[in-house]
């Protein structure tokens, strides 16, 4: 028996080990060999890098605490390892390096660039001379395939690298926009009346008659939603995996000809003819944001798709650029709509177009050419605060084009190529440094083959085709609507809200007593302690929580209380509410029996809220329930006066304290005879006596 | 002069060099390259949880052959395949699990029920019955006659063999230690004051002279056969029906109690169990540890088999079928992949220990996918939907209603206790931890 216990003691449970004092950081064996050896990074202890485990010390449950500690350690470790992973990014981005201070990158023309980068890279510089009106273009997400559409109905898709043409159609009617669906195997064209979907070989698959007179198309790749907006001013979302029309929003702003998507949160940005830019999610009938961006019509909107820097809401997509027919281009910060970060006036006539690249280059097409601007100067206000409007940021690259109008700009993903659509076809120019060099083959792979494409399609559907509900601490405008398709419900301005803690339930389990006290003590004390398990609540509270109680009487009582308490509730959150309440109360009959009863109940009660409200603080509670009216009256009065006196005294004390703290009044009194017994003085006396003794 | 370079991808780095080669994968872990990563991962977690439930087909097979209810199951400690079962009609079968065949079948091994079974070395088997006999069988020899018979004075309830020695212990109205070579017991172990019926006895697996027994007087007792006396005795609120020593932690002991719970005790601290396992809605009749010591199985009077994780006292995996009656004996196989249950309907059932595990060969890619799915579910189990799917188990209606009723009763009891405390003088009675209520007294 003892042997067993001894054996058991020899093997310490882990908890005992932890409870011992912390072991020495240095391991002798390790330090002796560490000079001559090096562990691989993955084996090295990252504990010192990990956040200290003190964060969870307040948690009483040991198992939970251990688990949380382990999780946070794991997160810290993986974060540290993530930094190491950057070393594996092999490819370098393109760039233009200046060797002389007097040189300027914008002086370098396309011929010089294509001449100096080599034959292979120079293939990105192309001119397509095409008939059939101004052209628009669109790349697939992996940047491998290009689709073009001319106003007169010429549609073509091809692999631009190998030059392999997938399809070429002459639709014979006005085509206003073009977009690939999840990959190059399907594409949608906004034609004169409806949106049509074609497959890679140009076979018409669907005619979406719900999208009437469309002008712009966007495809949200992770949600498999095709969004369109048209001259009637309706924004429509169609699920391309199921074919369902997910939602259609009436913009109420008339015909709309500009649309852009934020690739990081799948919010659709629309620019309207009255200069308003609106942000839309499929689950809300009203725009999430309305912004008066320009004084004239908005001609183009583009959202920053910069993957290199961290934007608002945990992802990218921090900036938005808008161009108006008033000839200005504005850059906005999507986290703060108060005013634009930078604005300038473009030269030339015609509607300016804007487009962001993957590394945050902004291309602006206006009049007779394209200008490219780069990030740090682009999103900083002008160094001279008085100059706001007319000055454009330092130019990175410029390229004149004779073929007006310039109708579309597209950067090719993972390439340094900008494709410009214009009246005479398309021309693509080289913009060194515009494309992200390192693609992730899990997301978009320019080199994927037939099998890879199929795999990605299936995986994309699997990741999408599921019922999801958001447990988001999202902003208040996010409304869950069960009638909608579920996945689009996850589109919010803040995509990182998924997987965060849910907001606290409105079904509180606090009892009425604790509720009142906690309400009065405001949020400072918190209501963490007052959460009582449902099963242990009194019956009435249980009914209240489960919503089975008839709350009418309760409300009335509350209202009365409010009225007497001098507007206890309505201090911070809205006078409007108060007014409504007051009006409601006015409308009610005064002589209701319950009211009478309650009035009687209150007759002998000195309401501390009333007293304290008049004095300015409402923290003291004394109830004096006295039943007999005759002898009770003087005593009540006395007690009332006593309270008042006490409160005044306290107020005075507090005032003096405050003044002392500020330094207006000196807290010291006159020196008194008793001061000699104070510490410092006594020590002096002692020293004196010692001296005498010595 | 301006130095200009333009981004170019080298196709040789991103394309397979030879046909049939895997396509090279390039990674960019920048979070901006992966929009909606969290939302997509959550969707994947929901799918993984659903797949897990979809593949959950735990029932493997039923071994028939007993005429009456199966009373006891025993596994051969050094074999992956051999399991013995004994039934109420005195039948005894030694099964070969992978082949589903019977190595030995004795229809009348004992008169009355076979109450205990255990394996000895060299493919021999000890059985005891209510006919006051212990019989030693050799199941390799295809012989239906016992090798040896040890007559006792009272009906036996349980038997256990010491590993790697000749000794075995039986439980009747007292605990007796026997030697295989001697026909009479070597010693009787009993506490002087006890008049109990000992219902089960088990040797510790690492300190082999330690013996634990449970009795009908709500006690469990620890003996040392070297001193030949009872060392400790613990009286509990309700009697225990089965006990098992942990195979990995030598001081840990598992008790299946009549009060619907299982308890693990650390025998260094017998004043309270270190964990209570609550989920059964009727008496727990049997329990057995997995050889890993991280989980164990229990079978109950509520016709369910439950598989518990050590240290997690709630929401175990639960198995049931329409025709399975009261589960009287359960067993974890020695490879920890299967669970056996013997029940009142006379069948021995084989279940998977992991309900959604795939039997048969699993390729490396499949294994990786399974592990990824598992980790996804584990990571997102706090999510409402994922957690619900992963946690929810369908229960037979009687079990479900019994559980609800039990919950109501316990809640009522707790509320009553609370009210009583509220209306007595403050501080007069303090709430007792549930663990402290289990043990009434500890004697030594």
Image (cartoon, coloured by chain):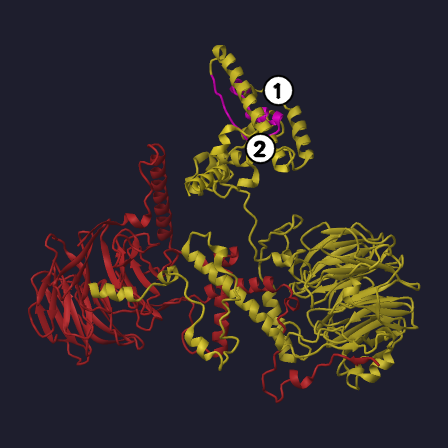
Chain colours: A yellow, B red
Q: Label for residue A590? A: 1
Q: Is residue A693 left or right of residue B145?
A: right
Q: Please say if A105 is above or below A623.
A: below
The Cα–Cα distance between marks 1 and 2, rounded to whole angstroms, is 57 Å
Question: Under tag 2, what secondary structure?
Answer: loop
User: Image quadrant of residue A161?
Assistant: bottom right
1 or 2: tag closer to the N-terminus: 1
Quick check: can you spot residue B392?
no
Viewport quadrant of the C terminus of chain A:
top left
Chain identifier of the residue bearing label 1 in the image: A
Q: Is residue B4 left or right of residue B342?
A: right
Q: Please say if A354 is above or below A586.
A: below
Q: Are marks 1 and 2 in contact (CB under 8 Å)?
A: no
Q: Residues within 10 Å of mark 2 (few under 14, many from 20)?
A: few
Q: Which residues are magenta?
A: A599-626
User: Image quadrant of residue A273?
Assistant: bottom right
Residue picked out by circle 2: A668
Viewport quadrant of the N terminus of chain A:
bottom left
Is-magenta flag for residue A612? yes
Chain identifier of the residue bearing label 2 in the image: A
């Amino acid at each position: 028996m003892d042997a067993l216990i001894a054996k058991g003691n020899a093997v310490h449970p882990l908890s005992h080990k932890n409870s011992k004092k912390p072991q020495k950081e240095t391991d002798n064996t390790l330090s002796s060999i560490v000079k001559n050896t090096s562990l691989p990074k993955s084996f090295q202890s990252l504990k010192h890098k990990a956040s200290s485990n003190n964060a969870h010390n307040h948690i009483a449950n040991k198992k939970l605490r251990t688990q949380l500690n382990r999780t946070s350690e794991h997160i810290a470790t993986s974060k540290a390892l993530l930094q190491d992973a950057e070393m594996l990014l092999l490819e370098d981005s393109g760039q233009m390096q200046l060797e002389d201070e007097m040189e300027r990158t914008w002086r370098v023309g396309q011929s010089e660039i294509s001449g100096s980068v080599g034959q292979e890279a120079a293939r990105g510089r192309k001119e397509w001379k095409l008939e059939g009106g101004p052209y628009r273009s669109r790349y697939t997400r992996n940047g491998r395939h290009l689709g073009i559409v001319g106003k007169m109905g010429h549609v073509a898709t091809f692999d631009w690298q190998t030059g392999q043409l997938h399809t070429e159609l002459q639709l014979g009617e006005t085509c206003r926009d073009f977009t690939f669906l999840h990959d190059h195997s399907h594409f949608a064209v906004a034609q004169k009346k409806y949106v049509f979907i074609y497959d890679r070989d140009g076979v018409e698959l669907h005619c979406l008659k719900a999208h009437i007179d469309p002008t712009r198309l966007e495809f949200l790749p992770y949600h498999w939603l095709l969004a369109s907006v048209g001259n009637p001013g309706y924004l429509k979302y169609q699920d391309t995996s199921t074919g369902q029309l997910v939602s259609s929003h009436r913009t109420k702003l008339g015909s709309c000809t500009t649309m852009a998507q934020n690739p990081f949160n799948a919010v659709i940005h629309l620019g309207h003819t009255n200069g308003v830019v609106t942000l839309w999610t499929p689950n809300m009938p009203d725009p999430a944001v309305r912004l008066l961006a320009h004084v004239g019509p908005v001609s183009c909107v583009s959202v920053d798709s910069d993957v290199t820097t961290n934007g608002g809401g945990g992802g990218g997509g921090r900036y938005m650029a808008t161009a108006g027919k008033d000839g200005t281009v504005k850059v906005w910060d999507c986290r703060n709509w108060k005013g634009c970060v930078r604005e300038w006036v473009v030269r030339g006539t015609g509607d300016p177009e804007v487009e962001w690249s993957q590394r945050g280059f902004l291309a602006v097409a206006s009049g007779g050419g394209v200008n490219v601007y780069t990030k740090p100067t682009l999103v900083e206000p002008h160094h001279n605060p008085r100059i706001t409007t007319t000055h454009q940021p330092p130019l990175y690259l410029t390229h004149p084009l004779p073929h007006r109008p310039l109708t579309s700009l597209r950067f090719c993903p993972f390439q340094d190529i900008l494709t410009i659509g214009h009246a005479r076809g398309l021309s693509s120019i080289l913009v060194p440094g515009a494309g992200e060099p390192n693609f992730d083959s899990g997301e978009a792979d320019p080199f994927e083959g037939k099998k890879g494409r199929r795999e990605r399609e299936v995986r994309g559907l699997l990741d999408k085709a599921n019922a999801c509900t958001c447990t988001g601490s999202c902003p208040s405008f996010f409304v869950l609507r069960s009638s909608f398709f579920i996945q689009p419900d996850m589109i919010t301005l803040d995509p990182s809200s998924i997987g965060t803690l849910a907001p606290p339930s409105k079904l509180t389990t606090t009892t009425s007593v604790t509720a009142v006290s906690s309400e009065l003590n405001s949020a400072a004390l918190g209501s963490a302690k007052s959460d009582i398990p449902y099963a242990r609540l009194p019956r009435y509270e249980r009914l209240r929580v489960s919503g089975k109680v008839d709350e009418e009487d309760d409300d009335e009582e509350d209202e009365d209380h409010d009225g007497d308490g001098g507007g206890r509730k309505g201090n911070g959150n809205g006078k409007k509410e108060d007014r409504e309440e007051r009006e409601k109360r006015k409308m009610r009959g005064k002589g209701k029996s319950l009211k009478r009863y309650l009035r009687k109940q209150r007759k002998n009660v000195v309401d501390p809220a009333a007293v304290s409200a008049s004095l300015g603080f409402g923290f003291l509670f004394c109830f004096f329930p006295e039943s007999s009216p005759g002898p009770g009256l003087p005593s009540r009065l006395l007690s009332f006066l006593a309270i008042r006196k006490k409160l005044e005294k306290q107020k005075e004390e507090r005032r003096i304290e405050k003044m002392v703290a500020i330094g207006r009044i000196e807290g010291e009194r006159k020196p008194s005879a008793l001061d000699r017994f104070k510490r410092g003085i006594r020590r002096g006396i002692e020293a004196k006596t010692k001296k005498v003794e010595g | 002069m301006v130095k200009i370079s333009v981004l170019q991808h080298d196709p040789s780095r991103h394309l397979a060099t030879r046909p049939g080669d895997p396509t090279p994968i390039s990674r960019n872990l920048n979070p901006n390259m992966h929009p909606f990563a969290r939302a997509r991962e959550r969707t994947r977690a929901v799918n993984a949880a659903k797949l897990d439930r979809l593949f959950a087909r735990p029932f493997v097979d039923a071994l028939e052959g007993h005429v009456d209810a199966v009373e006891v199951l025993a596994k051969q400690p050094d074999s992956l395949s051999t399991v013995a079962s004994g039934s109420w009609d005195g039948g005894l079968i030694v099964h070969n699990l992978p082949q589903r065949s019977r190595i030995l079948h004795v229809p009348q091994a004992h008169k009355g029920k076979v109450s205990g079974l255990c394996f000895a070395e060299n493919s021999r088997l000890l059985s005891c019955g209510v006919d006051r006999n212990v019989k030693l069988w050799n199941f390799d020899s295809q012989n239906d006659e016992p090798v040896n018979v040890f007559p006792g004075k009272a009906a036996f309830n349980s038997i256990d063999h010491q590993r790697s020695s000749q000794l075995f212990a039986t439980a009747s109205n007292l605990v007796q230690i026997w030697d295989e070579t001697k026909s009479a017991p070597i010693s009787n172990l009993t506490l002087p004051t006890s008049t109990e019926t000992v219902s089960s006895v088990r040797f510790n697996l690492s300190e082999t002279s330690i013996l634990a027994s449970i009795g009908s007087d709500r006690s469990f007792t620890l003996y040392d056969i070297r001193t030949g006396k009872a060392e400790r005795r613990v009286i509990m609120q309700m009697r225990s029906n089965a006990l098992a020593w942990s195979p990995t932690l030598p001081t840990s002991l598992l008790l299946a109690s009549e009060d619907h719970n299982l308890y693990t005790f650390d025998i260094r601290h017998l004043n309270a169990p270190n964990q209570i396992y609550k989920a059964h809605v009727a008496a727990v009749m049997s329990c057995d540890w997995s050889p890993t010591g991280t989980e164990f199985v229990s079978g109950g009077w509520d016709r369910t088999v439950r598989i518990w994780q050590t240290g997690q006292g709630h929401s175990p995996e639960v198995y049931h079928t329409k025709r399975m009656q009261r589960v009287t004996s359960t067993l974890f196989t020695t490879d920890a992949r299967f669970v056996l249950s013997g029940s009142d309907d006379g069948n021995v059932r084989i279940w998977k220990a992991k309900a959604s595990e795939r039997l048969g060969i699993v390729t490396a890619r499949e294994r990786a996918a399974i592990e990824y799915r598992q980790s996804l579910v584990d990571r997102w189990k706090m999510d409402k939907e994922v957690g619900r799917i992963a946690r929810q188990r369908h229960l037979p209606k009687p079990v479900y209603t019994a559980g609800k009723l039990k919950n109501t009763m316990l809640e009522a009891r707790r509320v009553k206790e609370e009210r009583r405390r509220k209306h007595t003088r403050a501080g007069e009675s303090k709430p007792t931890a549930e663990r402290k209520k289990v043990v009434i007294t500890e004697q030594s």
